[in-house]
Image (spheres, rainbow, N blue to C red):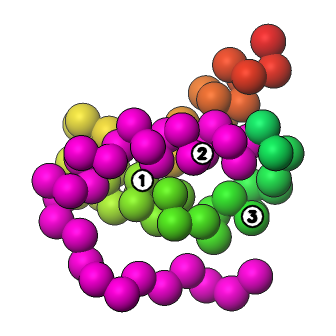
Amino acid sequence: MSQATFTTALTIGELEASYPLYCKALRILILEERTIKQIQRSVCWHRLETLHHCLPRQYKDPHQLYFHFKRELTT
């Protein structure tokens, strides 16, 4: 797989509005049993990283979300 590329930059507001969608995509990737390396190359991972970097008090680190969702889906 190649590195994800983006044609247009999204505003923080647009990223925030799509946050539930990125979390859903992350859950789907986990359900598909993708490796953490594969998931880290996804668009949803990069968008979650951007949100966490810009607003760390409001949005969790994608690694934390990954382990939370993985635990949630395996129990």
For the residues carrying marks 1 and 2, which lies nearer the camera in this image? 2
What is the spatial separation of the Cα atoms under label 3 and label 2, in whole angstroms?
13 Å
Residue 2 appears in the figure: yes
Image quadrant where one finds the N terminus: bottom right
> Which residue is label 2 attached to?
26
Q: At label 1, which amino acid type do we have?
A: Leu
- Who's the residue at 57% across and 46% down the image? 25
Q: Is residue 61 above or below residue 8?
A: above
**Horizontal placement of 64 versus 22: left or right?**
right
Element at label 3 = helix
Q: Quadrant of residue 61?
A: top left
**Does the magenta stretch mainly form a helix, a strand or a loop?**
helix
Magenta-span inclusion, residue 60: no
Q: Secondary structure at mark 2?
A: helix
Comes first in the chain, label 3 or label 2 = 2
Picture disc at residue 37: 3
Q: What residue is drawn where x is 28% and y is 83%?
A: 8
Q: Position of residue 33 (x, y in %)?
A: 85, 45
Real-space CA distance between mark 1 and mark 2, rounded to the nearest whole angstrom: 9 Å
Q: Which residues are magenta?
A: 1-30
